[in-house]
Image (cartoon, rainbow, N blue to C red):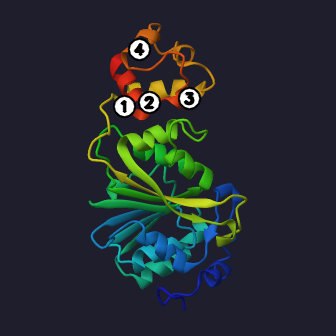
Amino acid sequence: MSGIDNLPPLREVIAKHDLAAKKSLGQNFLLDLNLTAKIARLGGDLTQADILEIGPGPGGLTRGLLAEGARRVLAIEKDPRCMAALAEIGAAYPGRLQTINGDALEVNPLDHLRHPIKVAANLPYNVGTELLVRWLTPREWPPFWESLTLMFQREVAQRIVATPGSKAYGRLALLAQWRSDPRIVMELPPEAFSPPPKVNSAVVHLTALPAPRFPADPGVLNKVVAAAFNQRRKMLRSALKSVNPEIEDHLIAAGIKPTERAEQVGLEAFCALARSLA
């Protein structure tokens, strides 16, 4: 028996179902159920929310979410080997867990969940950033989610909360901070996982803002930021020449020195530049 429910410890579950982690799927399983319950609590009150979980693996975080009172959990898992273990969790929490064996990039969660919706996941390393960018750049805002509680490599987590002037500052920080309030809420050493990754991990909690922090056209802002940081060593008047031939005038209009580099420019100034270009 584990400490949070009447199901077996995760090591027994992994042994029973022969769930050795696969590197090709970016799998690193978190085995301490007290830790998974703590991560679930970082998502706030779950009792009135449906939860989207990506990459549940043997179900450690899934059990934490259900034990902490989540109204319902939709768990999307690419690895068919994990489905039997997840079915055992579903049987222990009747009517509260739905599992889909599929690719999270191809499943529309709104077909299965009702609002309010929160996302909680120990994201597979190989798709984590792509999923985050998708969740931060929908056509309409506010998004389908109220909050994201996500595990990343610590280096990626630091890029999400980075400020101007730091090496970690870039497109991911701007996308996250424009429309959400991101915070690193927990760090974990490699030995917390099986197998241990080569890097430390961190949990980031992002709360969706009701409206973007500063007005800007999403497409223009994304284009400007991508071009600026693709050539981050160059001055902006050179890096953004392909965006608009009159870029120096637009930079000056936005209050940005044309000789500055992307990592020196804050979110508000990038939004002003996007408005000028639009």
Which numbered disc, 3 or 2, marks the residue closer to the eye?
A: 3
Q: State the mark number for residue 252.
A: 4
Rounded to the nearest angstrom, the CA distance separating label 4 from label 2 is: 20 Å
Q: Which residue is mark 1?
A: 218
- Mark 2 or mark 3, which is nearer the start of the sequence? 2
Figure quadrant of residue 57: bottom right
Q: Report helix, strand or loop for mark 3.
A: helix
Kind of residue at badge 2 = Asn
- Mark 3 or mark 1, which is nearer the start of the sequence? 1
Q: Which residue is mark 2?
A: 222
- Mark 3 or mark 4, which is nearer the start of the sequence? 3
Identify which residue, 225 or 249, lies in the foreground. Answer: 249
Residue 127 seen: no
Figure quadrant of residue 110: bottom left
Q: Position of residue 267 (x, y in %)?
A: 42, 34
Pointer 4 and pointer 1: residues touching (CB < 8 Å)? no
Q: Position of residue 47 (x, y in %)?
A: 30, 73
Rounded to the nearest angstrom, the CA distance separating label 4 from label 1 is: 21 Å
Residue 143 seen: yes
Rounded to the nearest angstrom, the CA distance separating label 3 from label 2 is: 11 Å
Q: Along the horizontal axis of the image, is 24 left or right of 116? A: right
Which numbered disc, 4 or 3, marks the residue closer to the eye?
A: 4
Identify which residue, 76 or 231, lies in the foreground. Answer: 231
Crowdedness near tag 1: few (<14), some (14–19) or many (≥20) residues, C-alpha within 10 Å: some
Kind of residue at badge 4 = Ile
Pointer 1 and pointer 2: residues touching (CB < 8 Å)? yes
Q: Report helix, strand or loop for mark 2.
A: helix
Which numbered disc, 4 or 1, marks the residue closer to the eye?
A: 4
Kind of residue at badge 3 = Phe
